[in-house]
Amino acid sequence: MRVEVATHAGVCYGVERALRLADEAAATGATVRTLGPLIHNPQAVADLRGKGVEVAASLDEVGSGTLIIRSHGVDPAIIARASEKGLDVIDATCPFVSAAHTCAHELAKEGLSVIIVGEEDHPEVEGIQAHAGGKALIVQSAKDLPKRLPSRKIGIVVQTTQSLARLEEVVSALLPRVNELRVCNTICSATAKRQLSAEELARTVDVMVVVGGLNSGNTSRLAEICRGENPRTHHVETAEELRSEWFENAESVGVTAGASTPGKQMQDVIAAIEAIR
Ligand code: SF4
């Protein structure tokens, strides 16, 4: 059985950086907390817990020590409050998310009404909105645009994981309705690259395996895309979940992993598939 790995698969730059910063903080022996799970991957979160890095649901739960801000970023008021409490703050906000924060802030400062293309309850979007002064409108698609826009001068910022097609759709719908439209394309290519190469691979192999947290939006989306191309697609978190019957009569198996899946997790699954003969 031949195993092929998608050209772009597994942990992205921002998540890898956050994991490294957490490891470094744990190695100092300090009391370390992350504000929310560092990544949407139960095994990686458990691994961090084993190293002494616990998850705090809110700032109120952290009295002292080190607080890690995850790659999604947060409202700057949270960082300010953490510093006031005397916490040692490690800001692991992904630089691509920080770029979206800067754009949102600048657009609002220049007097434009900010529209964020993204998911309303997503922590990254909440952080971007806070940087826009808390007044930004959030839309997931053009159909969410209100009949009455907040003004005829609009600035757009995009959640990093959104698709270009979604951004284009909102821009096209807004153009005829405004006098001024400024767009910050803050989409990060990591998601799109993983989706495209997973889709291409799923089309050519007999069985497709997608590795990553069942609670990870980006991994679940990869599985959905692969399933659209190949019904023999399976989404697993660990090698232990693989079933030999999935691979019956298969000559080729494709493997991909979400941007929040640590490399070792993907390698373990690949080794386990190769061991099935
Ligand atoms: S997907 Fe992109 S923006 Fe999000 S953490 Fe990874 S590198 Fe950063």
Image (cartoon, grey):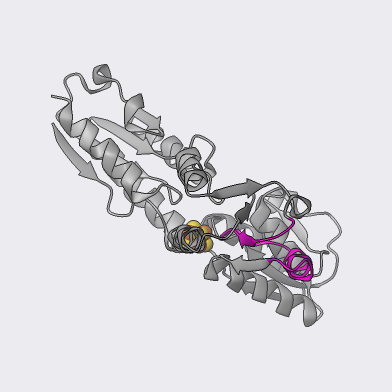
Above/below status of 138 relative to 171: above
Above/below status of 170 relative to 268: below
Q: Is residue 135 left or right of residue 260?
A: right
Farthest residue, direction bottom? 110
Image x and y of residue 30, in percent: 57, 60
Image x and y of residue 72, in percent: 60, 58
Image x and y of residue 14, in percent: 48, 62
For the N terminus, the quadrant is top left
Image x and y of residue 160, in percent: 56, 61
Above/below status of 43 relative to 31: above
Q: Which residues are magenta?
A: 63-87
Residue 146 visible in the displayed image: yes
Choose top left, top right, bottom left or bottom right for residue 166.
bottom right
User: Relative to the observer, which residue lies in front, 267 or 130?
Assistant: 267
- The residue sitting at 39% across, 31% down in the picture is 236
Residue 164 visible in the displayed image: no
Residue 73 falls inside the magenta stretch:
yes
User: Relative to the observer, which residue lies in front, 154 or 193?
Assistant: 193
Q: Is residue 218 left or right of residue 234?
A: right
For the C terminus, the quadrant is top left
Residue 108 falls inside the magenta stretch:
no
- The residue sitting at 59% across, 67% down in the picture is 90
User: Relative to the observer, which residue lies in front, 218 or 205?
Assistant: 218
Choose top left, top right, bottom left or bottom right for residue 269.
top left
- The residue sitting at 29% across, 20% down in the picture is 243
Q: Is residue 180 left or right of residue 242?
A: right
